[in-house]
Structure formats: structure tokens, C-alpha cells
Image (tube, rainbow, N blue to C red):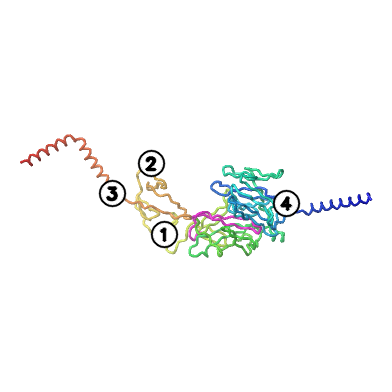
Amino acid sequence: MKKFLSIILSFAFCLALVHGKALATDAEPKIIINAINPGYTVDGRSNVGEFIELRKLGDEDFLLTGFSIKYTNSSGTKSTVFEFPDDSKMTGETLLLRLASAPDAELADATYTKTLAFSAGPLELAKSDEVVDSLCWTGKDDCYTKFTSANPTSLVRNLEDDTFYHDADYEPLFDKNKPSLVLKETVDEMVTPKCRSLEFSEILSYFETSKSEQFVEIYNRGDEQVLLDGCSLRYKNKTYPLNGILKAGGYLARYATDFTLTKNPTSENKLEIIDTDGVVVDTLVFYNGQKRGVAFAQFGYGADGKEQWKQTYAPTPGEANNFQEFQSCPEGKVLNKETGNCVKATTLSMLKECPAGQYRNPLSGRCKSYNTSSNSTAKPCPEGYERNPETGRCRKVVNNSGADYELSVDEYKQETSFIALWAILGVVVAGLLYIAFQFRAEIKKLGLKILKIFSRKHKK
């Protein structure tokens, strides 16, 4: 009997051991919040560095269906920051999300639009309605100390004791060529994201006559054609699909048929190319200063490796960019390259030469005399003005590129005669006052004599 019980117990232990191994093998990997940063203002740019980083505890890909990130602000309002698409997977050790309006938003697996506060929480990682992990930073109760703008830090998890600490040097990891967030279509097709070779090359926002002229141009710098289905543009937190095939080295003009670009924004406006996996591939920022009918286009790279963007009077939607510094002139007019303005042909080609000692004003076309007085003794020009080396007069400082601004000029008015008359009268008055002061005693005696004579005649 004892032997029989021993066999039964041994068998049960083996079953339990096998069952335990099966549970350990079948258990899905766990994900946690690894680090957060609320973003700071650096060199005038806001939300610099804002991110939420997740960590996967396990080697296998983790299915994110039903998972979301929720956030409670300092007022106690709870909202969803990001909801993972169905059948999406986390393949890397960490997964990085950044605020969409942050300067480095393109360096992330995905983006969100609700910014984090310096004192708030909890930030929750949830599956359906069940909270998997959470973190708060109010400095009260069991929450970690809040962030301060004077001492920028990130809250980072210590995996050894499962606590968080403020780290001023922490930088999340992200590899643009190896994203951690993989969507269903990418998993099914077993291909890499397809829009990584796309970049912005031209934009025309300030149309001349109709909104239909507005366009954004995209260039494929890769060696293979790109099927654009699934790629999209994002503008003002809304996405707009791209479609068709863009050949290697080709250009695509996406006209603003379903959205409107701000013609000449008072602040920076941003467009983004979004890949099928939600990654920001390229960002275009256009600023105030756009001109009517003039495109803003990329023309290669500078010595520092940065893209060179210039305004051009020759928009080329769907074609290689063409730099035209000055506007095209209508029939009967030619371009004055000194001003960037169109003038009558006779203004430049048929005018008589100016007499000796005079020069032709490029703005007015008139002859003007050179200023022969020495500039060394002249008073400095006021702020915003410079001395004309030919005339010695102060003139307004203007941009003469022709590409960004038109020249303006302050006409010089001859007022010397009027000023001279007042100067003479001033001298005369000053002289009379001086004489009266010097001979005041004599003038007083003379006045008394005249008064006595006048009194005697009045008595008679």
C-alpha cells in the first residue's frame, strides 16, 4: 500500500512539473513602462525630448492587440494617449513613442498628440480595462517627485528593484531601420516598411488665383520604386493618404484637394510623411515669408549636411526643382537685376548717359549728383540705414536678392533752401538780442529821454 501511494505521489509530482514547464513556456512576455519625459523648452523650441518608452521582458514578439496608454492630467481628467492597432506587434526590446509636435518626433516608433505635464499621473499601460503597469509623478502619496524646467530629467525604471529615478542624461534607443512596432500588413507580408526612401522636395502654399494651385512634392531618393498605398501625409494632426507608384528618383506632386495649406503662416507649419508602420519618415516646416505664386523648394545639401531650401519663381510640381531667383517679366518689360523688379525696356537700354559728375539711380532711373563731401566727418546713419558710397547720403538698408523681398526706397527730398532761410532768420534774431544786451544802459537812457520829451509835449 505504501509502495502504491509512493508511485501515485511520484506520478503526480511529474505531472505538476510538466504542467509547470508548460505554463512557463506558454506564458506571454510582459511589457512595462520603462521611461518617460514630459518635454522641455530649449532654445525657444517647446516639448523638446518628450517621450514614453515601453520595455518588453522576454525574447519573443509581443502581440499588442487591446493594449493602450492612458493618462490622467493634473486636473484629474483621464484620456487615452495611444491605442495600439489590432494585430500589431512589439518586436524589439524597447518601443518608443514621442509627442507629434516635438522637434525630434520622427525618431520614434509612433507618435501621440497629448502632451505630458510636469506634475501629473498616473500614466497607465492597460490591456482592455485592466491596468498592467502605471506611474505617477506628483510628489505626493506614493508618486515620484515632479519634473522641473530648471533641472530637465527623465524618469527611468531601475530593473533591479523595479523603482524609478530621475536621470538627466538618459537617451531612449531608436533605430529608424529596425522599428519595434510592426503593423499587421507588415507582419503578414513579411516585408520592411516601404516609405523610408521618401522625402519632401517642394511646396507651394501661397497661390495666385486658386487654392487648386497648392501642392506638396515628394521625391523618392531610393533605388527602387515605391508603392505608396498605406503611406500618408500628416498636416495639423490629420492624415491624408498617398497612392500610386513613385519610381526611383521620381517626383510626385500631391495637390491639396482634401485639405488647405496655410498660405503665409504667422508661425511655423509642419507636414510629415508617415510610413505604413506609423513612423515619421520626413518632416517639412515652412515659415512666414511665403510669396504669392512662389514655391519653396530643396536644392541639395550644404557643407553641414543640412537640406538647402530656397524660394523659386519657377514651381515644378512633379519634376526636378528649378531655381529662378527673380520673377519673369511681362512683354515689354525687362528685369532690373539690381532691384529684382520689372521695368520698361527703355529704362535700362535706351536712356542717355548721365552728365559728368552724376550717376543713374537704379531705382528711379534718374541722374543724380555725386556727393563730393568727405564721408569721414559725416554723422553716423541712424539704425536701419547705411551710407551710400556713391552719394554719401544715408539710405535704407534693403534686401536686394530679388528672391525673398522686393527693394523699397525712401525718396530724398530737397529741403535745403527752406532750412537755409530759417537759419538766416535765426542768425539775425540772435544778433539783435546780443546788441540789445551789450547796450542796455544806453538804450535805457535813450528811452527815458524820449519819455520826458513826450510828457512835456503832452502837458503843453
Q: Give the residue drawn at x 22%, y 38%.
A: 434
Marker disc for residue 343? 1
Q: CA distance from mark 1 to mark 3?
A: 34 Å
Query: Which residue is nearer to you in this view: 331 or 167?
Result: 167
Marker disc for residue 418? 3
Q: Is residue 329 placed above or below 107 in the rendered structure?
A: below
Tell me if I can see residue 58 in this picture. yes
Marker disc for residue 376? 2
Callout 1 touching callout 3 (CB < 8 Å): no
Tell me if I can see residue 201 in this picture. no
- Counting other residues with Cα less than 10 Å from the Cα at mark 1, is it few (<14), some (14-19), or many (20 or more)? some
Q: Disc 4 marks which residue? A: 30
Quick one: SS at disc 1?
strand
Picture coordinates of residue 426, whole percent (x, y): 26, 43
Question: From the viewer's perspective, is 313 left or right of 168?
Answer: left
Q: Earlier in the sequence, mark 2 or mark 3?
A: 2
